[in-house]
């Protein structure tokens, strides 16, 4: 088997976002003793990975972030109030999660493809650091709601039907 790999870049390390051109070509001859080689020609593989299309996600929309934060807060309060583990801390737990979610929506979220898991990890960490109950469970409830609603709500908002 013969393989050659060439990178066209001034750096020895390839970019994670494919900003460099990579060329990979391999020639391989497979040998099977019971198979007649004349019936099956040499297998060849050639592929070129080129620069990925560059796409700029839209900037966050403050009005969308405000509206979505209110929906999130309402849902999370209703969901976590059903759990005994939060007791009198439910308002504080929801407040911490809502603050982190709001910050993310106002500064990072720019539509489908930009919903990150990091804010939800931050929620669990912040709740644990403050000694509040149910950090992982609250973060799980938050991410489940977000994955089911945020991108869908964004599409609806940006289509002009934001009722």
Image (tube, rainbow, N blue to C red):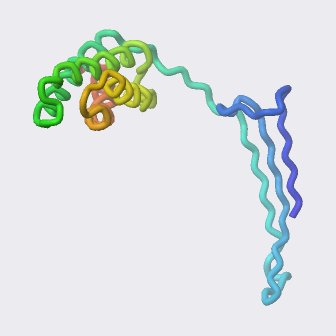
Q: Nearer the viewer, residue 132 or 22?
A: 132
Residue at the spot 17% in from the left edge and 30% down from the top edge: 86
Q: Nearer the viewer, residue 78 or 27?
A: 78
Spot the residue most to the top. Answer: 62
Q: Nearer the viewer, residue 156 or 102?
A: 102
The C terminus lies in quadrant: top left
Q: Nearer the viewer, residue 3 or 56?
A: 3
Where residue 67 sits, quadrant-wise, is top left
Residue at the spot 29% in from the left edge and 22% down from the top edge: 97
Residue 109 located left or right of residue 73: right
Q: Position of residue 61 (x, y in %)?
A: 36, 12
Whether residue 36 is situated above or below residue 26 in the rendered picture:
below
Whether residue 6 is situated above or below residue 28 in the rendered picture:
above
Q: Position of residue 105 (x, y in %)?
A: 36, 18
Q: Position of residue 131 (x, y in %)?
A: 29, 25
Residue at the spot 89% in from the left edge and 60% down from the top edge: 2
Residue 90 located left or right of residue 150: left
Residue at the spot 45% in from the left edge and 14% down from the top edge: 59
Q: Position of residue 55 (x, y in %)?
A: 56, 25
The N terminus lies in quadrant: bottom right
């Amino acid at each position: 088997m013969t393989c050659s790999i060439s990178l066209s870049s001034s750096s020895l390390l390839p970019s994670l976002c494919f900003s460099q051109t990579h060329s990979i070509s391999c020639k391989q001859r497979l040998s099977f003793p019971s198979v007649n080689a004349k019936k099956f020609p040499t297998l060849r593989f050639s592929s070129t990975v080129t620069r990925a299309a560059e796409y700029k996600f839209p900037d966050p929309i403050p009005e969308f972030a405000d509206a979505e934060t209110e929906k999130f807060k309402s849902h999370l309060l209703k969901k976590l109030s059903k759990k005994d583990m939060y007791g009198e801390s439910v308002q504080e737990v929801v407040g911490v999660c809502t603050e982190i979610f709001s910050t993310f929506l106002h500064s990072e979220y720019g539509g489908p493809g930009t919903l990150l898991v990091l804010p939800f990890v931050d929620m669990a960490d912040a709740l644990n650091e403050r000694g509040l109950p149910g950090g992982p469970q609250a973060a799980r409830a938050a991410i489940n709601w977000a994955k089911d609603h945020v991108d869908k709500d964004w599409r609806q908002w940006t289509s002009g039907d934001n009722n």
